[in-house]
Image (cartoon, helix red, strand yellow):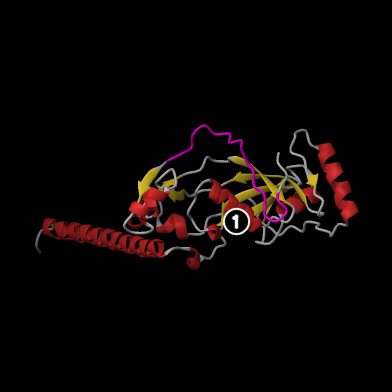
């Protein structure tokens, strides 16, 4: 494990997915995203299985000596080589494990490898290579280990995960949660963008029940329309229009059928 650069966050990914496939890929263009999204699944609020209740984690400010002691205690409790290391500048590096619990598919460029310089020069229009995208489901409950700095923020962790998968979706569509099990209950708390996951890991210790990290969709109950691109917004309008037309068709068909049965009953009745 190389020494992390003090000026930039360090991200080293190790894969430990417990699923063998779980992928469902299909190419789509910006005009056909409705194959993967519906107004109900993308916009409706989903019931939560876990109790998303505010949990007060203890996050005291530690002196340099306390940080060094905490790191020694942490390293003595783990049964792997995922140690924390103290740097000369007072920061420290270590590993955090992130569990992916994504319900909806993610979008990546349809080209599996980046275009070469020659390809870019031959391309008549800039950006045409990324207009077509492939949407697929990430393996359910996949687990990723990230090597990060103590000053690495939650938003940077999300962006690093998306870059690793070449995901082109807006990072604001995702959120990093901390999860804890207490007295048989599961509690979730969404991290703010500037919180430092490795610092939380150090304070909580290595126990996954005391603290673990989960990447989920950023479903806050209200739709953040600013997080969607123009093609996606236009696509949502088309979806709503199609659903409205379908509801109207079903209503008209229902009353037409009812009217026909009433008329048949009237013709069957004898006069007088």
Q: Is residue 35 magenta?
A: no
Q: Residue furthest left?
A: 271
According to the picture, the residue beneath numbered tag 1 turns out to be 175
Describe the element under mark 1 as helix, strand or loop.
strand
Q: Is residue 133 visible?
A: no
* Position above or below: 124 against 146: below
Q: Quadrant of residue 263?
A: bottom left
Q: Which residue is nearer to you in this view: 214 or 71?
A: 71
> How dense is the environment of label 1, judged by Cα within 10 Å: few (below 14), some, or many (20 and up)?
many
Give the quadrant of the N terminus: top right
Q: Which residue is nearer to you in this view: 92 or 155?
A: 92
Give the quadrant of the C terminus: bottom left
Q: Residue furthest bottom?
A: 226
Percent across and percent down for residue 15 are 60, 37
What are the residue bounds of the magenta stretch?
Answer: 5-24
Identify the residue at image location x=39%, y=47%: 110
Q: Quadrant of residue 54?
A: bottom right
Identify the residue at image location x=84%, y=37%: 76
Identify the residue at image location x=55%, y=60%: 172
Identify the residue at image location x=37%, y=59%: 126
Percent across and percent down for residue 117 are 42, 50
Q: Which residue is nearer to you in this view: 168 or 245?
A: 168
Q: Is residue 65 left or right of residue 86?
A: right
* Position above or below: 63 against 205: below
Q: Which residue is nearer to you in this view: 189 or 95?
A: 95
Q: Main secondary structure of the magenta part?
A: loop
Q: Is residue 8 left or right of residue 37?
A: right
Q: Is residue 88 visible?
A: yes
């Amino acid at each position: 494990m190389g020494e992390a650069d003090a000026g930039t966050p360090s991200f080293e990914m190790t894969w430990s997915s417990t699923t063998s496939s779980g992928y469902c890929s299909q190419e789509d263009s910006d005009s056909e995203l409705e194959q993967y999204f519906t107004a109900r699944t993308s916009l409706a609020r989903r019931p939560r299985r876990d109790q998303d209740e505010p949990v007060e984690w203890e996050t005291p400010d530690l002196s340099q000596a306390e940080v060094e002691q905490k790191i020694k205690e942490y390293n003595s409790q783990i049964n792997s080589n995922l140690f924390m290391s103290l740097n000369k500048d007072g920061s420290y590096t270590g590993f955090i494990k992130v569990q992916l619990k994504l319900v909806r598919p993610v979008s990546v460029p349809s080209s599996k490898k980046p275009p070469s310089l020659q390809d870019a020069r031959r391309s008549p229009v800039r950006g045409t290579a990324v207009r077509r995208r492939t949407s697929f489901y990430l393996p359910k409950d996949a687990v990723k280990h990230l090597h990060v700095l103590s000053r690495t923020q939650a938003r940077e962790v999300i962006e690093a995960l998306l870059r690793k998968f070449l995901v082109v979706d807006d990072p604001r569509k995702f959120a990093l949660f901390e999860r804890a099990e207490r007295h048989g209950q599961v509690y979730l708390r969404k991290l703010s963008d500037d919180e430092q996951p490795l610092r939380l890991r150090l304070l909580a210790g290595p126990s996954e029940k005391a603290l673990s990290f989960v990447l989920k969709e950023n479903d806050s109950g209200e739709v953040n329309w600013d997080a969607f691109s123009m093609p996606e917004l236009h696509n949502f309008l088309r979806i709503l229009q199609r659903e409205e037309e379908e509801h109207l068709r079903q209503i008209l068909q229902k009353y037409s059928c009812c009217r026909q049965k009433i008329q048949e009953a009237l013709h069957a009745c004898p006069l007088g």
